[in-house]
Amino acid sequence: MRKAFSSLLMLLVCITFLSPIMKASGPVASNPALVPAIASNNTIVVSNSTDVPDAHVVQLAVYKIAGSNYFRLRDLAMILKGSEKQFSVSYEERTKTVSLTSGKEYTATGSELRGTASENASAAISNNEIYINGEFATLTVYKIEGSNYFKLRDLGEALDFYVGYDDRTKTVYISGAKGYEKDTGPAETRQPMIPYEQQAVH
């Protein structure tokens, strides 16, 4: 009887110590190199003209990582294609290098603007070197499901396209018709380029 009681006590102790480990299981916990990427609930409005009211909502995969919006590189290149702030994207397989060139027209691959963000995904620091206009760029870039995701404001500043945010409507504004404006307030709280009520969103 005493032996059975000792065995039961030992089993309870093992379960108690193992429970936190079992609860912590999952892709992020099992791999400390991964961070959580949460699907963004922001509305994304793009406008590439100052003369024509062409502001429109776009649907694309956007993730929040550590409170900031991260966009898929080729999606951004596609929505700015044909604007004053367009940029090209090229990839060198041998060196695993991604190169962006301001003012050069983007060549679509057919994969753009097709994905939707998973409710919960995992992101890892990208293993690619990034060059912008021939210069090595020290930007934080994450890989999510095989694609490079850039912090929107980092890329807006590096490529000089407009990024705005309206906290009241939870709307992110991107424009290829205006240059980057440094955010002087809290992170991602700048006002939109045009008051939301005046945007010709369709």
Image (tube, rainbow, N blue to C red):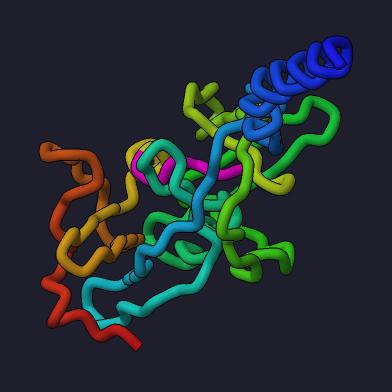
| 159 horizontally vs 177: left or right | right
Is residue 124 visible in this depiction of the protein?
Answer: yes
Q: Quadrant of residue 51?
A: bottom left
| 113 horizontally vs 2: left or right | left
In this view, which residue lies farthest toward the bottom? 202
Image coords of residue 190 (percent x, y): 16, 51
Name the residue nearer the viewer: 86 or 70: 70
Q: Quadrant of the N terminus?
A: top right
Image coords of residue 92 (percent x, y): 77, 35
- Over which residues does the magenta segment extend? 148-153
Image coords of residue 27 (percent x, y): 70, 37
Q: Residue at x 11, y 72 (%)?
A: 195
Q: Quadrant of the C terminus?
A: bottom left
> Does residue 111 sit above or below 160 in this rendering?
below
Task: Check residue 150 for magenta coloring.
Answer: yes
Q: Quadrant of residue 43?
A: bottom left
Image coords of residue 116 (percent x, y): 60, 66
Name the residue nearer the viewer: 113 or 37: 37
Name the residue nearer the viewer: 56 or 12: 12
The rendered magenta stretch, by its main secondary structure, is classed as: strand
> Does residue 20 sit above or below 61 in this rendering?
above
Task: Check residue 142 for magenta coloring.
Answer: no
Q: Residue at x 68, y 44 (%)?
A: 90
Q: Quadrant of residue 48?
A: bottom left
In this view, which residue lies farthest toward the front? 1
